[in-house]
Image: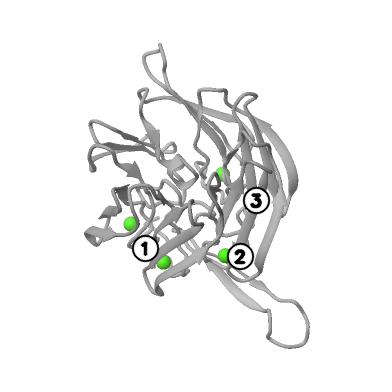
Amino acid sequence: MGKIDFYAAGNGANSNGNSGGDYIYTTSSSTLAGSALSNFDGDLASDVAFFRPGQNKWFSQNIQTNATLNTTFGGRGDRIAPGDYDGDGKTDNAVFRGGKFRIQRSTLGYQEVTLGTAADAPVPGDYDGDGKTDCAVFRASTGEWLLIQSTAGAATLTLGQTGDKPAQGDYDGDGKTDIAVFRPSNATWYITRSTLGSTSLVYGASTDRPVQGDYDGDGLTDIAVFTKTTGTWGLNRSADGNTTVTLGSVNDIPAPADYDGDGKTDVAVYSPPISAAAGTWRIRKSTDATLYTLNLGLNRDVPIASGYIAQ
Ligand SMILES: [Ca+2]
Ligand SMILES: [Ca+2]
Ligand SMILES: [Ca+2]
Ligand SMILES: [Ca+2]
């Protein structure tokens, strides 16, 4: 079978007798929900992948075929900003540094986008829902989200304050990334959904890290937190309810993505080697809850999947 494109689609209707509030949604492989994060070969599953600072190496391994890709892109001081900026279904090498995105698009070639300042956090997502990742930054000091959308153009939205961690995702499942923050001081999530409007929820603890993803595969991003001291993942799933999973420890980097390609985000961590020869990837497959492990990586390697959540 050749390459196919993955789309989830559905209806959101409120049965009030008219079309108000009703909509049709689609999610393509470039959104922050579903099965296409960290997907360098463009199949249906996320790849184990990392960025190695210093060497500027991008390495990915398909865990079904063990096929690997190895490219070089980026420079000193870069933060990864992964996404599918050209909408071809393959994750593009992309970095943010000093108010500029540098993107090696898999089909359309190199692109630079000037946006924000060095102090801003890159928060790429598909804010206009056209299937292409948009450049975006979050400025905590003012709560501003500065967007340059691939179809809808430039926009500035406001949500958040100093200390907040950005947690963008598609929480209402309309195919458009929604701005969102996790506020450690009160353990509250604040979300401005593109179709359903504003909402907030107390979930997690002040020291938790936001690890939002689509853990139940319904097309809606789920609020989720990782407590590194206990290795506990709290998943507030939109369709399947609240649950916890234990995976990881204090030195681990959360790397949630859909590695088994079933449309549900898998709980996953990267353990840097510290004193061992290589790091360890641990992925809890959503299909059967079995653990996949792979020895791969060095101490400063940055999991590409961690580039979709607050770094
Ligand atoms: Ca691409
Ligand atoms: Ca877009
Ligand atoms: Ca949305
Ligand atoms: Ca999965």
Q: Are marks 2 and 1 in contact (CB under 8 Å)?
A: no
State the SS at label 3.
strand
Task: Classify mark 1 as within 8 Å of ligand 1 or not, answering yes or no.
Answer: yes
Q: Amino acid at mark 2?
A: Arg
Q: Amino acid at mark 3?
A: Trp
Sort mark 3 into few (<14), some (14-19) or many (20+) by Cα contacts within 10 Å.
many
Q: Are marks 3 and 2 in contact (CB under 8 Å)?
A: no
Q: Nearer the viewer, residue 179 or 213?
A: 179
Compared to residue 82, the image places residue 195 above or below, namely below
Residue 196 pos. (x, y %) = 66, 69
Q: Image point 58% across, 47% down: which residue? A: 212
Question: Which residue is disc 1 drawn over?
Answer: 87
- Mark before the other along the chain sequence, 2 or 1: 1
Ligand 4: which quarter?
top right
Labelled disc at residue 189 = 3
Question: Which residue is disc 2 drawn over?
Answer: 193
Q: Is residue 96 left or right of residue 199?
A: left
State the SS at label 1.
loop
Label 3 vs label 1, nearer the camera = 3
Compared to residue 251, the image places residue 15 above or below, namely below
Quarter of the rendering containing residue 14: bottom right
- Marks 3/2: CA–CA distance: 12 Å
Q: Image point 62% across, 77% down: which residue? A: 23
Compared to residue 146, the image places residue 279 above or below, namely above
State the SS at label 2.
strand
Q: Amino acid at mark 1?
A: Gly
Task: Classify mark 2 as within 8 Å of ligand 3 or not, answering yes or no.
Answer: yes
Labelled disc at residue 108 = none
Residue 33 pos. (x, y %) = 54, 54
Q: Image point 40% across, 12% down: which residue? A: 276
